[in-house]
Image: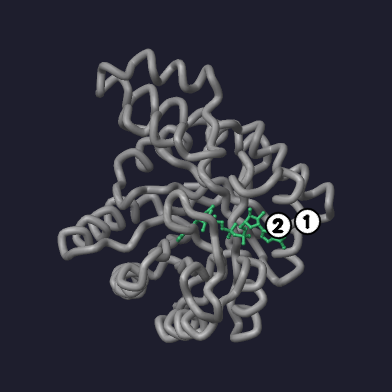
Amino acid sequence: MPAENIIDLLASSTGPTFSVEFFPPSDDAGVQQLLGALEALQPLEPDWVSVTYGATGASRYKTFSAVGALRGQTATSLIGHLTIAGQSKSDVVRAIEAYERLGVTHILALRGDPPRGESFVPHPEGLTSATELVTLIKSLGDFTVGVAAFPDGHPESTLELDAEILLAKERAGAEFAITQLFFDADAYAAMVARFRALGGTMPIIAGIMPITVPSQIERFASLSGSGMPAAFEAQLRSVADDRARFREVGIELVTDLCRQVIAAGAPGLQFFTLNRSTATHDILSRLRSTADALPA
Ligand SMILES: Cc1cc2nc3c(=O)[nH]c(=O)nc-3n(C[C@H](O)[C@H](O)[C@H](O)COP(=O)(O)OP(=O)(O)OC[C@H]3O[C@@H](n4cnc5c(N)ncnc54)[C@H](O)[C@@H]3O)c2cc1C
C-alpha cells in the first residue's frame, strides 16, 4: 500500500498529527541506533517520519542511505529534507531525482546554513532561496513540498519579513510548514497569526525538541533566535545539578509546551528525536493520557 499523502493525513486526522525527525547516521552503529529508535517509536504510530539533509557532500549521500534503510523498515509516510547551500542547480536536480527513485514524494525545501560565523552566499550556479527550491521541485514532478517556519524569527530576518517569505513559499507551491524548535507557545501562535493575516493558509506543524540534559540549555541559548522564556529556563536551571530530576522537569515542561501549542491550534507536532526514542515516547504518552490527547 503506498504511503499516505501527509496533507490528506492532516486533513483527515481527528486531532494533531504526531511525526518524528531523524538525521542520517554516519556509521553502521548509528544506523542501528536509528532503526532501533524507529522500532521503539512504531507502536506510537507516527503519521510520518522525516530525514534531514546533510550540510556537506558526504553527509548528503548518507541522507539517501538513511531514507533507503527506513523505507525497508516502515510503510509510514516519509519526508526527505533538501537544501540548496553549497550546491549547483544541477546538483539539486540530481538530489530530487534521487528522492524520486527512492519513492519519496514529500520534500521539505530548505536553504541550509553557511558554515558557523559566515554569511550565506549562493553557489555561483545555484539557487538563492528556499522559495526558488519550492518552485524547482514543483516543476520536476508530483511532489508535496513543505518548508521551514520560525516562531522566534529567522536569525537573518525580521518577524514581518519571515511571514512574507512564508507566504511567497506557499504561492510557489508549498503545502505545509514545519517550525524550528521553540519553547514559547505564544511565539508560535503569533507567528501563525502574522501568516494568516497576510492570507496564508497552509498548516504549520510545531517542531518540538525534548529537553533531557542540562547542556541543552546553553546550546539553545546560543542558537540565535530560539529564546527560552525566562521562567522555563529558570525551572531547568534550578535542577541542573540533578540529572534525573532535570530530565523529569524537562520532559514535563516540553509536554506542557505541546499542550499549549495544541490549544493554540497546532495541526501537528513534529519531534526532533536526535535518533533516540525514550524522550519522545515519554512526552507522547503523557499527552495521550490526558484530555488534550493526540489520536492514538
Ligand atoms: C523544520 C526544519 C528542518 C530543517 N532541516 C534542515 C536540514 O535537513 N538540513 C539543513 O542543512 N538545514 C535544515 N534546517 C535549517 C535551515 O536550512 C536554516 O534554518 C536556514 O537558515 C533557513 O532555511 P529556509 O529554508 O528558511 O531559507 P529561506 O526561506 O531561503 O530564508 C533564508 C533567509 O533568507 C531570507 N530571504 C529569503 N528569501 C528572501 C527574499 N526574497 N528577500 C529577502 N530575504 C529573503 C529569509 O528572511 C531568511 O532570513 C531546517 C530548519 C527547520 C525549521
- The answer to whether residue 169 is left or right of residue 38 is right
Farthest-out residue, left:
29
Tell me where residue 11 appears, x and y as whole percent. Answer: 66, 59
Please name the amino acid that badge 1 sits on.
Gly
Nearest to the observer: residue 203 or residue 98: 98
**Residue pictured at 48% horizontal, 42% vertical:** 208
For marks 1 and 2, give the CA distance: 8 Å
Nearer-N-terminus badge (1/2): 2
Label 1–label 2 contact, CB within 8 A = yes
Image quarter for residue 99? bottom left
Residue 14 visible somewhere in the drawing: no
Please name the amino acid that badge 2 sits on.
Leu
- In the picture shown, does residue 249 fall above or below 74? above
**Residue pictured at 47% horizontal, 58% vertical:** 114
Task: Please give the residue where the numbered disc 1 appears in the rendered image.
Answer: 200
**Residue pictured at 71% horizontal, 43% vertical:** 159
Tell me where residue 229 appears, x and y as whole percent. Answer: 55, 24
Residue 16 bears which disc, if any? Answer: none
Mark 1 crowdedness (10 Å alpha carbons): few <14, some 14-19, many ≥20: some
- The answer to whether residue 275 is left or right of residue 202 is left
- In the picture shown, does residue 244 fall above or below 169? above
* Element type at mark 1: loop
Task: Please give the residue where the numbered disc 2 appears in the rendered image.
Answer: 166
- In the picture shown, does residue 4 fall above or below 290? below
Residue 176 visible somewhere in the drawing: yes
